[in-house]
Image (cartoon, rainbow, N blue to C red):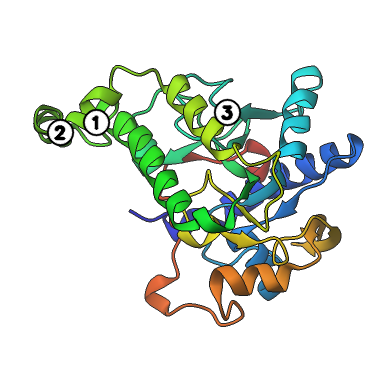
Amino acid sequence: MYTDDVYLHDIHQDMMIILKKFDAYCRKHNLKYSLCGGSTIGAIRHQGFIPWDDDLDFMMTREEYRKLQKCIKEDPIEGIFFQTYETDKNFPHDFAKLRLEGTKGREWIHQRVKMHEGVFADIFPVDNVKGHSGKFNTFMCRVLDFMVWFKTALFFPPKVWMYPFVFILELITVFPFLCNFIPMRTLSKWREKFFTRNNDKPCDYVGILAGYAKNDTFIPKSALNDEYMDIMFEGEKTMIITNYDAYLRHCYGDYMTPPPLDKQHGKHGYVGYVPFKNNKE
């Protein structure tokens, strides 16, 4: 299920509110971040959003990410709900979402999950990865994601007609059945412990382990550096890593060439979308 194109303009406006608030907050608290993924491509290729994209992605080193968590506990971002597995018990991810208060909308796969909803931007922490464990690391990230995905699907199937199939799946598959008895927060803590296990060790690789893109879990440090510069995004100033070209080429190859028309769609599948009221005034 894809996001209806008719909503994209308003979703982009909502996400720009998030970007401006987040950027101002990070500069106020001397926190470093960068656009990542498709948002980086958008900044370079389109000077803003990829026209059909329906999300906004940031990344931070784990150290900066934890500083952000501490700052937000003491000084919340006005008008933004900082969503993590610690602030929302049913949140099934090990990265954070910045939810814009006064909006509604959730991803199709999460539409029955009882958690905070609203237009969002993702913040992915970046962790160290050992060179010899790249394939194993990617495999384990997917296994741990699979556990939480199953838990989310088993507890909150997106569609009512899926209930009998989910019940059958529970009966014949031990792995997801056992996941039902492990609290979501416990699973998330297990994942985070696995993701961060190499952060105090010298490593030549890093990864966005809490994400879902295979090419993001094993990136040479030379391609994802820890230096930042300002760049304009939809006419607003934001941050990006200085070595963005090496990062994008590693993850996407020829990122300046748009995908075929049949691939040009928002991937998150917003449902129940209600824009920020000021967008309609």
**Is 220 left or right of 149, judged from the image as shown?**
right
Question: Within 10 Å of the Cα at label 3, are there few (<14), some (14-19), or many (20+) other Cα atoms?
Answer: many
Q: Can the viewer see residue 47 in this picture?
A: no
Q: Secondary structure at mark 2?
A: loop
- Looking at the image, tell me whether mark 1 or mark 3 is earlier in sequence order: 3
Q: Quadrant of residue 14?
A: top right
| Most foreground residue, 200 or 266 | 200
Q: Contact (CB < 8 A) between labels 2 and 1?
A: yes
Q: Can the viewer see residue 2 in this picture?
A: yes
Q: Secondary structure at mark 3?
A: loop
**Is 280 left or right of 3, judged from the image as shown?**
right
Q: Amino acid at mark 1?
A: Pro
Q: Position of residue 205 (x, y in %)?
A: 64, 57
Distance Cα–Cα, label 1 vs label 3: 22 Å
Q: Secondary structure at mark 1?
A: helix
Q: Position of residue 220 (x, y in %)?
A: 65, 63
Question: Within 10 Å of the Cα at label 2, are there few (<14), some (14-19), or many (20+) other Cα atoms?
Answer: few
Distance Cα–Cα, label 2 vs label 1: 6 Å
Residue beneath label 2, please?
A: 173
Residue beneath label 3, please?
A: 84
User: Which residue appears at 61% of the width and 37% of the height?
Assistant: 196
Q: Position of residue 18 (x, y in %)?
A: 70, 42
Quadrant location of the C terminus in the rendered image: top right
Q: Amino acid at mark 3?
A: Thr
Residue beneath label 1, please?
A: 176
User: Which residue appears at 43% of the width and 56% of the height?
Assistant: 267
Distance Cα–Cα, label 3 vs label 2: 29 Å
